[in-house]
Image (spheres, rainbow, N blue to C red):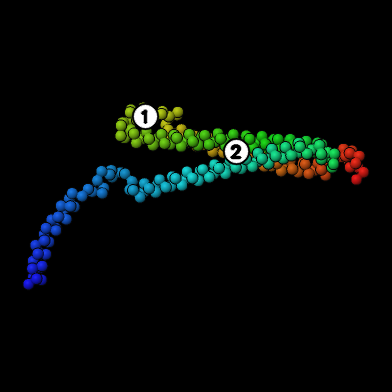
Amino acid sequence: MANKALEAIGAFLKPVSRARKAADAEEAPDAGAGRDSRDPPDFELKKYELDREHELELNKIAHALEIERLKVLQLLNGGAFTVLAAFAPGLLRSHGLSRPLALLAAASWVVGLGAASWATQKQLDAQGKFNKAYRCRRNAVELRRLSTTFGEEAASRMVPPAEGQSHADDADDAFKEGGRLGNKLWKLALASLFLFGLGAALLAASLGFADPAQLTASERAK
C-alpha cells in the first residue's frame, strides 16, 4: 500500500514539475540577449586582447634592447677616448706612441661616439613616428565606431581631424617614415661599432710603431 501511495503522489507531482521547469525557462534571460549578431564572441574578444597585450610586451622588449645597444656603443667609444686621453702622456713617456696614429684613433672614437648619439636621436624620432601611427590607427577605429553610433558629424567633433586625407593614410605614412628612420639607425649603429674597432686597431698600431725619440732617458736606459 505504501508503495502504491508513493507512486500516486509521484504521478501527481510530475506535471507540476514540468510546468515549473517550463516557467523557469521562459523567465530565465537569454545568454545571447542584448548582443548584436555582429559582435565578436567572448572567446575571440579575449583572444584579441591577449594578442594585443603580447604584441605590446614584445614591442617594449625590442625598444629596450635597442636602447641598451646604443648605450653600449656610446660607452665603448666614449670610454676608449677617455682612457686614451687620460693615459696618453704616460704611454708617451714609457712606451712611446706614433702620434699620428694615436690621434687618428682618438678621432675615430670621437666620430663613433657622435654616430652612436645620432643613432639614439634617430631611434627617438622613429619611436615618435610609430607612436603617431598607432594613434592614427586608433583614431580611425574610434571614428568608424562613433560614426555608427552618433553619426559622422558628431563623430568628427569627438575625434581629432586627420592631417591628410584620412587617419588610415596618416598611419601608413607614419609607419613608412618610422621604418625609414629605423634603417638609418641600424646603419649608424654599425658605423659606430666599426669606428670603435678601427680606433682600437689604430692605437695598437701606434704602439707598434712607437718613436724611440719620445722615450725618456730612464726608459732608454732600460
Instruction: Depth check: give the residue in front, 90 or 205.
Output: 90
Q: What is the quadrant of residue 167 in the picture?
A: top left
Q: Is residue 104 visible?
A: no
The answer to whether residue 7 is above or below residue 222 is: below
Q: Secondary structure at mark 1?
A: helix
Quadrant of the rendering where the C terminus is positioned: top right
Q: Which mark is residue 185?
A: 2
Residue type beneath disc 1: Met
What residue sits 36% from the left and 27% below the top? Answer: 157
Residue 63 at x, y percent in the picture: 54, 42
Q: Are marks 2 and 1 in contact (CB under 8 Å)?
A: no
Residue 119 at x, y percent in the picture: 61, 36
Residue 111 at x, y percent in the picture: 69, 35
What residue sits 53% from the left and 36% below the top? Answer: 127
* Residue where numbered disc 1 is placed: 158
Which of the two labelled residues, at mark 2 and mark 1, occupies the earlier sequence position?
1
Query: What's the distance in space between the residues labelled 2 and 1, CA to CA?
Result: 37 Å
What residue sits 90% from the left and 41% below the top? Answer: 218
Q: Secondary structure at mark 2?
A: helix
Instruction: Depth check: give the residue in front, 136 or 43.
Output: 43
Within 10 Å of disc 1 (Cα), the crowding (few <14, some 14-19, many 20+) is some
